[in-house]
């Protein structure tokens, strides 16, 4: 209750501003948070639970404690609670009960049919239970009959009271609520989860609970913090006109469409220096690799706390030399096993978009970050790389967070997605500021493109000529197997080649990535053979690009690594497009636009980044992407479950650890994303955490070439 009261006092204004809730509900919402904290663990006062936490390993609970609590609050003690409910608006009771049921993300109980049917003895006659119940007196709880309460046995068979009440719970509390009321309910559920985290984890650490929370949640950014990041990057030069235009945008939603290498990220930090003032900043990228590169490139040594957050960020901190060391605060949180609170003290977070958007589908990482998320400004970079499902969740996030300042950045965006962002901006109660890249750079002739069809051999002579002149070549394949085959042929011809794709052990993939980036920055010739992993946030500037056919946004991204470094190039550089033997992993039907686009730009004439975009925009509009229709966090009032709806499209790969690496201390370092195994019984393989253990000798592995299944 202390944690809930403290968190409510600190973030209530941010919650109401960010979610667009009217101030009339301000005081009731703060009370709902404390009342739900008061109630949420009543159900632990039963003999089964108490025996379990006292070490009786033979105990199997007949029902989860959240269900017992709901039975008490919604049914057995309803007369004592009626005066409390009457003090508040209708949504208040629903918010409180839904928060109680969902604070462990396990409601309704998916394993109920496998539990024993043993009756539950609820210890209502215990003095400590009566003392706890009496704490609700100040909210209106009628405690006049507490002395009469006795322990009671509750049946859990399907025909008896507790299961019957749980089944009718959704109907009993109602589901018809306005958008504003649903926001209040969702904010109560998430607020209780945050209070439960802090209230459960911190007291054992010998700290003052309220002071710990206040000191960390009150850390915010000042303009000078991010201005210094920009000054370090500009090295004494003034911002470009377009960068200053981004910074000066007054709209809550700003869209920046600018070619690769135009300085979008500097513009984003200029924007954040203004819009994240007295807030926090979440800088979101589409992948772990892009997040790590973005973090190392701009937050090497800031004057404020900054944190890299993604599924393998702890490994990146340890293994990547260009990642700055964690601050003392973050180290202390990890040392005290408080990882769930890692974003609470940090005013600037660089992360994957999944960290933020996962909130919409009850992903723990996003829920745990709630006290930081509601007081933040957001940058979503490289949104052209968002699949349709992830982009739909971005649209839903923009809808439900109307008061949050948001900057969306991309090199190219389909017209239909741009129109959808504009439509969402109107529902947020404001407009959208659309800003293009610097015209002098966007319109400068940069490329000479050629469609080579299936004549791959045409590339080898041109590659050899560029390498003899000390230049850099980037060859992008659509599949790992073709990338490996190309690199092996290059090695046979004595070319200086580096291979980079996703099918490495994670620790080796980090090394492969650094080898490519460092090699391109060195004054030696180099051929980098990669897959789609080279499309985003890799600071490469090639003298020759060779690429297989791919969707147009991907090709524009790949061209962003060609002749990139000069603002207005002194000469154009060649790019070659080839038809692969198979369009996998892309849908063959999607290649119609690609062929039309290539025909319009790959004619040997000088073309600019603007030409690429104009040709793409001229293609016939495709399908539209609407906001995600269902959010477990916002729409699932009575339901609070994890992993029910994905925020990304399904993958055809699975993460495995070789049997030979299974004893390593950190399995994530040795995990490899592999195509689905040939073994029809692969789902029954041994697991370590989330990773499958591939049987011995089932994968051939080379630290320079990567992994292959043994057929």
Image (cartoon, helix red, strand yellow):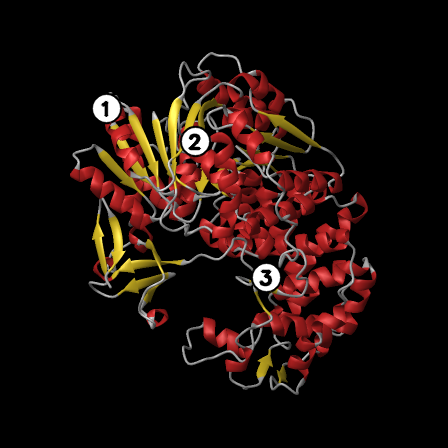
What mark, if any, has residue 624 been given in the picture? none
**Residue picked out by circle 1:** 524
Residue 651 visible? The answer is yes
SS at mark 1? Answer: loop
- CA gap between label 3 and label 1 equals 57 Å
Say which quadrant the C terminus sits in: bottom left
Left or right side of 4 for 709: left
Is residue 98 shown above or below 167?
above
The percent coordinates of residue 239 (x first, y second) are 53, 16
Query: In the image shown, does 170 or 463 lie closer to the viewer?
Result: 463
Left or right of 334 on screen, residue 526: left
What x and y, as percent, mark residue 670?
29, 52
Residue 709 in the figure: left or right of residue 403 = left
From where the camera sits, is residue 269 visible?
no
Residue in the picture at 29% in, 58% down: 657
Which badge, 1 or 2, comes first in the chain's sequence?
1
Residue 584, image x, y percentages: 41, 52
- Return the x and y of residue 405 as percentages of the image width and height: 65, 35
Question: Eyeballing the image, is 336 above or below 471?
Answer: below
What residue is shown with label 3?
Answer: 103
Q: Nearer the viewer, mark 3 or mark 1?
A: 1
Residue ID at (45%, 72%)? 54
Which residue is denoted by mark 2 in the rendering?
559
Q: Is residue 621 above or below residue 296?
A: below
**Front-most of residues 360 and 61:** 360
Mark 3 vs mark 1: which is more N-terminal?
3
């Amino acid at each position: 209750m202390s944690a809930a009261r403290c968190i409510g006092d600190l973030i209530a204004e941010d919650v109401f501003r960010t979610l667009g809730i009217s101030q009339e509900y301000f005081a009731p919402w703060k009370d709902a948070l404390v009342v739900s904290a008061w109630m949420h663990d009543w159900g632990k006062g039963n003999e089964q639970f108490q025996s379990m936490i006292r070490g009786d390993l033979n105990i199997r609970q007949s029902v989860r404690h959240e269900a017992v609590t709901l039975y008490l609050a919604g049914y057995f003690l309803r007369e004592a609670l009626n005066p409390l409910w009457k003090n508040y608006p209708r949504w208040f009771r629903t918010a409180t009960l839904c928060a109680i049921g969902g604070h462990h993300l396990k409601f309704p109980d998916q394993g109920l049919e496998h539990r024993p049917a043993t009756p539950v003895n609820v210890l209502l006659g215990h003095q400590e239970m009566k003392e706890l119940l009496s704490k609700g007196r100040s909210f209106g709880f009628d405690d006049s009959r507490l002395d009469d309460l006795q322990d009671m046995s509750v049946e859990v068979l399907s025909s008896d009271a507790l299961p019957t009440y749980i089944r009718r719970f959704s109907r009993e509390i109602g589901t018809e609520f306005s958008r504003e009321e649903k926001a209040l309910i969702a904010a109560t559920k998430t607020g209780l989860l945050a209070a439960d985290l802090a209230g459960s984890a911190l007291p054992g650490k010998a700290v003052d609970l309220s002071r710990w929370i206040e000191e960390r949640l009150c850390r915010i950014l000042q303009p000078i913090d991010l201005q210094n990041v920009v000054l370090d990057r500009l090295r004494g030069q003034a911002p470009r006109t377009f960068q200053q235009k981004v910074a000066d945008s007054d709209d809550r939603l700003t869209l920046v469409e600018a070619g690769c290498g135009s300085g979008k990220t500097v513009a984003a930090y200029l924007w954040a220096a203004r819009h994240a003032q007295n807030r926090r900043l979440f800088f979101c990228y589409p992948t772990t690799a892009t997040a790590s590169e973005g973090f190392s490139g701009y937050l090497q040594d800031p004057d404020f706390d900054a944190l890299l957050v993604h599924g393998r960020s702890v490994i990146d901190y340890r293994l990547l030399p260009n990642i700055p060391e964690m601050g003392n605060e973050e180290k202390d949180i990890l040392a005290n096993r408080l990882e769930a609170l890692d974003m609470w003290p940090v005013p600037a977070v660089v992360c994957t978009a999944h960290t933020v958007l996962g909130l919409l589908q009850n992903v723990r990482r996003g829920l745990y970050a709630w006290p930081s998320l509601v007081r933040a400004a957001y940058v979503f970079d490289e949104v052209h790389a968002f699949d349709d499902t992830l982009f739909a969740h971005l649209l839903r996030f923009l809808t439900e967070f109307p008061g949050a300042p948001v900057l969306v950045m991309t090199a190219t965006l389909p017209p239909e997605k741009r129109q959808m962002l504009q439509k969402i901006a109107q529902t947020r109660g404001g407009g959208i500021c659309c800003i293009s890249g610097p015209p002098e750079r966007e319109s400068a002739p940069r490329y000479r493109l050629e469609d080579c069809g299936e004549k791959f051999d045409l590339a080898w002579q041109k590659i050899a000529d560029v390498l003899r002149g000390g230049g850099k070549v980037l060859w992008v394949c659509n599949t790992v197997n073709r990338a490996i085959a190309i690199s092996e042929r290059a090695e046979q011809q004595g070319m200086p080649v580096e291979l980079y794709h996703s099918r490495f052990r994670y620790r080796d993939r980090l090394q492969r990535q650094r080898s490519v980036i460092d090699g391109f920055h060195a004054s030696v010739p180099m051929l980098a053979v990669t897959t789609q992993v080279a499309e985003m946030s890799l600071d490469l500037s090639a003298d020759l690009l060779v690429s297989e056919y791919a969707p147009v946004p991907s090709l524009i991204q790949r061209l962003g690594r060609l002749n990139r470094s000069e603002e207005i190039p002194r000469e154009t550089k060649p790019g070659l497009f080839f038809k692969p033997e198979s369009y996998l992993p892309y849908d063959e039907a999607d290649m119609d636009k690609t062929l039309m686009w290539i025909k319009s730009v790959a004619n040997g004439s000088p073309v600019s980044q603007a030409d690429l975009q104009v040709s793409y925009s001229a293609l016939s509009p495709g399908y539209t992407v609407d906001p995600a229709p269902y959010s477990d966090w916002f729409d699932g009032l009575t339901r609070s479950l994890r992993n029910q709806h994905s925020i990304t499209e399904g993958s055809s790969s699975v993460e495995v650890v070789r049997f030979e690496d299974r004893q390593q201390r950190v399995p994530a370092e040795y995990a490899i994303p592999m195509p689905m195994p040939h073994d029809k019984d692969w789902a029954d393989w041994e697991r370590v955490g989330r990773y499958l253990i591939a049987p011995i000798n089932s994968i051939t592995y080379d630290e320079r070439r990567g992994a292959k299944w043994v057929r």
